Image (cartoon, rainbow, N blue to C red):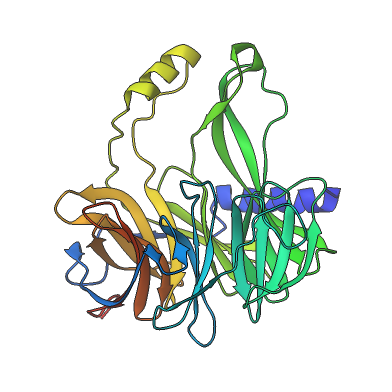
Amino acid sequence: MTMLRLMRRSLIAFLMVSGVMQVRENPQQPVHPNPDRVLKLVEALKIKGEGKGYYFEGARTLEIDPIGNLYACDSWSSARRSHLMKFSPEGRFIKDLYHQGEGPGEILSTFDFTLSGSEMFLYDTMKRKIVVMDTDGNFKTEFKKETEPFDELIGTFGDWLVILRVSRPLERQTSRLYDEKNAIIMLSKDGKTEKDIFMFTNRSFYISPTQGGGGMSWDPFHSAIAGDRIYVCSTQNYQIQVLDMAKANILFSFMRAYPRVEHLGRDWEKKFATQYNAPKRNYENDVKGLIFGGGRLWVRTSLESKDKGALYDLFNSDGRFVDSFFVDSRVRIIKIDDDFLYASVSDENELPFLVKYRIGEPIGAR
């Protein structure tokens, strides 16, 4: 990294700390006159987790092509095999685009994927390679990162892939919290050009080698792409930063007054803290996930109600707190598409479904 780049990032950090960088503060209640209600959802499409020619255990990522075909990636199945399933707009299974293996066009195990026009990009997290195929699953090319592998394929921006690379501390002689560097990287779609655009910092607890090594995550890292912006939360508190990818700087950050949720430590956490002198976690991470869609940012919060479900906050693109509502905790939202949302859902028998819901009421500011 050049000295000029380091100086530039240091200046940005100084501006944020000194208050020159704009921080938008929101009140505890949104603009909507009826917050904290249960969001009305109307089922529009339901795809079973098992059907003729396919099987999945719960979709974790979803993309939609211009004609409405759905591409759903699931977690490992009981056979330790992932899937990338293509469905028609009506929910008819077309084919599994995932090819397991180590050869050209094959993925060893887990992967991230994103859709850009008529091309799909899959990042094999084990073999450190990116596979390019068309939307019918036909292999086009692949390229590999021999050094400095990526941690996540976030999405695309114009002619670039947007990548996350986490730099972990090399020297961990004592068991304590360490800073991790989360670099947002632009990678050309042929893999030949790479450039860093910004660095976010969060923390993890690492165990010293003399105590056996290993560690535990501490601060979260959530991101959501929206055009030329990335919304990022990398702190336990309710604060979201907005990165302009074209200009490679932070436009602004925003927060809202939020009643923190007490963290009820599990037995293993108490044993871990005692054994390694780890700090006590008093509160849950305020933000549990970010999704952008329909021109708005959906924030899953740490607040859950047994009767209502999980609380989601809604912000416009400029960070204004416009709405909040509960969604059944069994409905894990994975995609927002205008007035529809897609979710991975388990029924009372823990059977998985991919469900498309129409949002059955106006949301946001009135």
Of residues 292 and 18, which is closer to you in this image? 292
Q: Position of residue 7 (x, y in %)?
A: 77, 49
Question: Along the line of sight, which residue is nearer the eye, 222 or 199?
Answer: 222
From this viewpoint, is residue 267 visible? Answer: yes
The residue positioned farthest toward the bottom in the image shown: 67
Count of labels in the image: 0
Q: Is residue 110 left or right of residue 171?
A: left
Of 265 and 100, the residue lying toward us:
100
Which residue extends farthest left? 307
In the displayed orientation, state which residue is furthest to the front. 52
Which image quarter holds the C terminus? Answer: bottom left
Give the left or right position of residue 316, taking residue 262 as reference: right
Give the x, y percent position of residue 302: 32, 47
Residue drawn at the location 72% of the way across and 68% of the way down = 132
Query: How far across and how far down the image is residue 306, in percent?
Result: 17, 48
| Residue at image location 41% in from the left, 57% down from the top | 58
- Residue 163 can be seen in this image: no
Q: Quadrant of residue 322?
A: bottom left
Q: Quadrant of residue 184?
A: bottom right
Identify which residue is drawn at 60% across, 30% down.
178
In this rendering, would 146 be left or right of 51? Answer: right
> Measured from the top left, where is residue 257 in percent x and y?
31, 52
